Image (tube, rainbow, N blue to C red):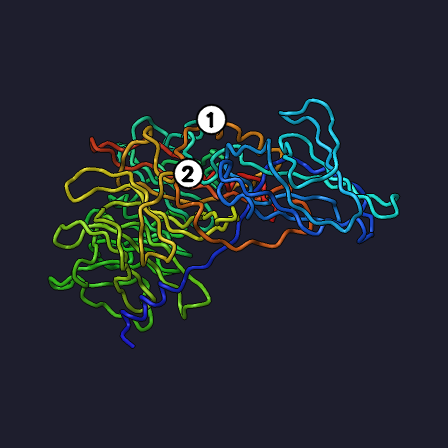
Amino acid sequence: MNRKFLIYLIAAFLTASAAVSCNSDDDYETEPYVPSSNVAITSFSLGANSKILANLDSVHFTIDLERALIYNADSLPKGTDISRLLVTLQSSGANVEFNVKNGTRLEADTTFTYSNSDSIDFTGDVRIIVTAADEVTKRIYTVKVNVHEMLPDTLCWNRLARRNLPSIGSRVVEQRAVSYRGKAYCLLNEGDGYVLSSIDNPGNNVWTKQEITLPFTPDVRSLTATDDAAYILDSEGALYYSYDLLSWQPCGTVWKSISGAYADKVLGVADESGVLKHVAYPAIDGFSAMPLEPKFPVANTSDMIMIDSEWNISPVGIITGGTDADGNVVGDTWGFDGTRWAKISMFPIPPHSGMAMAQYITFDVASNWKVTGYPTLIAFGGKLPDGTLDNTLYISRDNGVNWNRGDSLLQFPEYIDKVMCADALVFSSKLSVDSRSALDEWTAMPAPKLPVWCSFLTGVPASRATEDITEWDCPYVYMFGGTTSTGELSNNIWRGVINRLTFKPLY
């Protein structure tokens, strides 16, 4: 089989989906379980009302017979009016009553016999009392219609979470941030010297900073970290390696540029007797220096992202955008499978150089309002062929084969400058039910409206956890530095997150 075609197939089939759902943080009141099928609610749904919400009758409700809870795990969109909803339910009981209190429409407690023509005010506390035919056995169910308190699928970059680059002095000329052995490292050129800063998690904002002396003049932007070492080029293209980013040793080879990190190897481009070739260090079995393909990027590419799954024989490393040997700006995605490079993008990003790229997650909401999360590549920033900078965020759910402009919820706010050659790192922070309240600042962030297509996509629900979740990992995207339109370095670390990921999950 043609190797170029093979790597395309590998990249095309790497996508895996993960179901992610959320609801509000309200705790449900429970009562001891009554082991009687004579007081069970066997089905529950809302009545159709397109004036309130499309496909309202398709909203999935979980009936937890053990805890006597009825709720929609996938919350309805922010602003949904739940003060007048019809209910359709089936029960094994002889009599079903609703008790409503503290709602926006009714101040006093109200109890009435169930009818599918009566509207229920779910802004308050709603209980369903099911009585068996013996008129003695009863079961009280708590019903909750969850509604998001904010736009859940907005990628928010909180102004309050912005930090300066971790420098020692007040002037930073260049910077490069990489993830290495579970930590974030930031190499800074402060004009009169170099500083190396490190941190276990950028969310902690407690950096270890130290001035370092290098035996060469580094190309700061070339710093790349593999699984077991860091590599950098000097101003003449000589390649160096280090295990701690402090002590550097020469590799004995000269390259034109570094293409990316592939597992424990670093890939690059070298000029061999006037011919540009793909190279690797240390050597890779089965891989030899080969001439570059037309339009292969030799500068200002994105970081390499490693993609691995059960579908492929070996991992695939991918890069996006950059500048080719003739100085042309390109937007294609290229993949390396361990022995060969190939262009894998079928619908690429428009030509950009200096884009940042990271692995993240985005969500779709089905017509019945179920939520599905998808592993997603995001790429943003960079310079267009006409020299202007662009902040458009693009996404790919098939590992770089097809790219699309992200919807309005994912685009950058106006208060973030357009930059090129920024670095994107993803680190997770532990959130809990208690710490979530500290994130209320997100609710004040401006956010665009939900796109129309959200109500027409499909999803797959996940199974419920057996125990209530009190803490969870929330992945944040950190954007380091970047060069502005004036050519100056942006002295910023921005932290972004999809709002939905900060919600307490049920699964």
Q: Height in image: 129 above or below 360?
A: above
Q: Disc number at residue 450? A: 2
Identified by mark 2, the residue type is Leu
Q: Which mark is residue 444?
A: 1
SS for tag 1?
helix
Which residue does the image show at 60% across and 49% down from the upper left?
Answer: 507
Label 1 with label 2: CB-CB less than 8 Å: no
Left or right: 364 in relation to 384: right
Residue 32 image position (x, y, % from top left): 81, 44
Residue 433 percent across, percent down from the top left:
62, 36
Give the amino acid type for the residue marked by disc 1 in the picture: Ala
Q: Look at the numbered disc 2 and give the secondary structure of its residue.
A: loop
Instruction: Say which quarter of the image contains residue 214.
Output: top left
| Near-viewer residue (218 or 358) | 358
Location of residue 121 (image quadrant): top right
Q: Looking at the picture, how far across and down is residue 224, in whole percent?
A: 33, 51
